[in-house]
Image (spheres, rainbow, N blue to C red):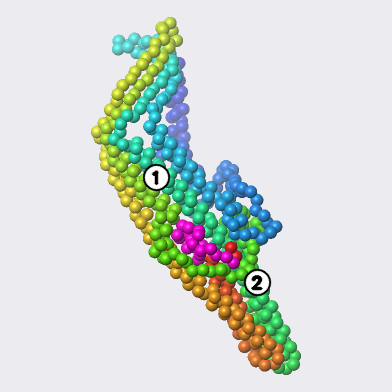
Amino acid sequence: MHRYCQTCSALTGALFLFFAGSQAAGQSIWSDPFGTGGRTATEPYLRWESTLPLPQVGSPQVAGELARNQPLSLPELTEFALRNNPRTRQSWLAARAAAAGVGIEKADLLPQLTANYAVTRTQQVTNQGAIVPWQTRYGPSISLSYLLYDFGVRGFQIETSEYRLLAANLAHNRVLQDVVFGVEQAYYRLIGNDALVRVNVQSLKNAETALEAVSKRRESGLATVADVYRAETLVAQARLNLTRSNGELEKSRGQLASVVGLPVNVGIAVRPLEAPPQTTEISASIGDLLARAKASRPDLVAAEAQVRASRASANAVARAGLPSIEVVGGSGRTSFNDNRPSASNYNIGLAIRIPIFTGFRETYSVRQAEAQAEAAEASRDALVRQAEVEVWQGYYDLTTVNSSISSTEAQVRSAEQTAQATLARYQSGFGSILDLITAQQDESNARVQRIQSYLDWFTTLARLQVAVGASDLIKAGGGK
């Protein structure tokens, strides 16, 4: 007893010194007992500095290798992207986690068994104040519980997990479509910028040819120094356009590398656009496309699955406050450290749980679950309206772009012939430098518009396919 008092005194003194030291340092042990405030910046305008080494960011996983010594096609890039884009792995793992959630809910259909092994040492005092000697008890035990009836709570919980798994799988499918669409966008942007570079190279050559022609006429006294300056300005502008297009080309190359799952500094070569796209009219009507989007677009079906999951969850929450019937049982064996014999015990019973008052928890839980279910319905309706707009706009954008390609082809042919004729006329001593510059600029603009029409066709078709949730709307060629 004397040693116990000494131990208590030493512990009390240590606690007193600890509290006193904390108060002397201006800290309150009650407000921040673990000193977490010191692990942040001391003031909102100061930068936080770590006292420990920061974790290093790991490198993204790459499955397989992409051929880099030859131009790549869109199918090759798409297949590689589906294997290496982190979003596909992320959505797949989310679906796997949702599948495990179904197993978690179904586990409640089986009995629950728990094994224990306990060692206890106690010293008790009798009602008369006598101290009972220390006793040590030890031994294994096992307990069983099985829910017989709960008014359908388990069934609704399993239904909730099943619909969430369905939504996760559909979300994974949508991510695959988004990745494919991202590769298509980056691919077409790259081939468009590559074609734009070639156009600007040709424009620079034409401008240099014009400058050479002006210089010769200047030497012959048939052109003024102002004509030379105009031609030099045209050459400088052509060089600037070429520099800018080269920069856009490298940016789009890095974007494509990132989309397929590679570092942005990895150079990717693609097959250039060598022919105009073989466009055809969409055979399906806009009404058919809208109906098809509602039936096959994964994110829309996933939104409907989320609504049903929320409804099932609300039903489970509403019935959680009802009575439940459970079978309980167990067995154990107790041994002692003295000469007393060991003893076994067994029990089995039927338990009825009747919630009476939980501080209005059930009321607010039901209200919250109903609100979440209605919010899921509103999210689904908003997504449906958004999908309708995307299909509507994509349909008419593609129709417009389809008719513009033939127009730009005719415009390029006319502009090329005009520029050639104007250059020949100027070299023969007729016409003005302004006519030549205007003709060359018209030729360059026509070529740029033709490239843009090609790019608009491919990207608009890809966008419409994503909006509908299908990839077989039109079989397009010429670069695919």
Task: Examine the image and state in which quarter residue 182 appears.
Answer: bottom right
Question: In the image, what residue occupies the spot 62% across and 61% down?
Answer: 253
Residue 33, compared with residue 279, is above or below; it is: above
For the residue marked with disc 1, what is the amino acid? Tyr
Task: Examine the image and state in which quarter residue 361 appears.
Answer: top left
Task: Say whether residue 335 is magenta.
Answer: no
- The image's mark for residue 229 is none
Residue 134 is situated, as x and y percent measured from the top left of the image, at 41, 12
Question: In the image, what residue occupies the spot 58% across and 45% down?
Answer: 54
Residue 364 is situated, as x and y percent measured from the top left of the image, at 29, 43
Q: Which residues are magenta?
A: 460-478
What kind of element bears circle 2? helix
For the residue marked with disc 2, what is the amino acid? Arg
Task: Examine the image and state in which quarter residue 242 appears.
Answer: bottom right
Q: Residue 186 versus residue 59: which sits nearer the camera?
A: 186
Packing grade of label 1 (10 A; few <14, some 14-19, many >=20) is many
Residue 136 is situated, as x and y percent measured from the top left of the image, at 43, 13
Distance, label 1 to label 2, CA atoms, is: 52 Å
Q: Quadrant of the C terminus?
A: bottom right
Question: In the image, what residue occupies the spot 34% across and 18% down?
Answer: 347
Residue 346, compared with residue 288, is above or below; it is: above
- The image's mark for residue 198 is 2
- The image's mark for residue 163 is 1
Q: Is residue 225 visible?
A: no
- Determine whether, in the image, residue 375 is placed left or right of residue 34: left
Q: Residue 105 versus residue 56: which sits nearer the camera?
A: 105
Task: Say whether residue 461 is magenta.
Answer: yes
- Determine whether, in the image, residue 448 is placed left or right of residue 293: right
